[in-house]
Amino acid sequence: EERRRDIAKQLGEKKEDCLVRVRQARHDALDAAKEAKNAKTMSEDDAVRLEKQVDELMNSLKNELEALAKAKEAEIMTI
C-alpha cells in the first residue's frame, strides 16, 4: 500500500513536469508568433488565430494528460 502511494506520488510529479514542458512549448510558440508579427512576416489576424489554436491545443493536451494520469493512478491504487 505504501509503495503504491509512492508510485502515485511519482506519477503526480511526472504529470507536473509534463505540464511545465507543455506550457514552455506554448510560450515558445507564442513568442515566435509575436516576433513574426513584429517583423511583419505575419499579420495580426494570423497571430491571433495562431494564439487561439495554441491555446486550444494546450487545453486539449492538459485534459488528456489529466485523464491519463487519473486512470493510471486508479490502476496503481487497485490491488
Image (cartoon, grey):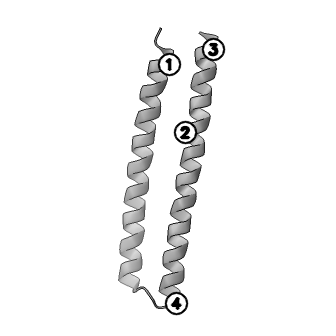
For marks 4 and 3 on the same chain, the one whose residue lies earlier in the sequence: 3
First in sequence, mark 3 or 1: give its number: 3
The residue indicated by pointer 1 is 76
Asked if residue 45 is positioned above or below residue 49 in the image, the reply reads below
Residue highlighted by disc 4: 39
Horizontal side, residue 46 vs residue 7: left or right: left
Q: Residues within 10 Å of mark 3 (few under 14, many from 20)?
A: few
Q: What kind of residue is marked 2?
A: Lys
Which residue matches tag 2? 15
CB atoms of marks 2 and 1 within 8 Å: no
What numbered label is drawn on residue 12?
Answer: none
Residue 30 rendering spot, x and y as whole percentages: 50, 70
Alpha carbon distance from label 4 to label 3: 54 Å
Find residue 66 and report its horizontal and vertical position in percent: 45, 38
In the rendered structure, find residue 3 and report the number of the disc placed on it: 3
Q: CA distance from mark 3 to mark 1?
A: 10 Å
Q: Secondary structure at mark 1?
A: helix
Give the Cα distance between marks 2 and 3. 18 Å
| Cα–Cα gap, marks 4 and 1 | 50 Å
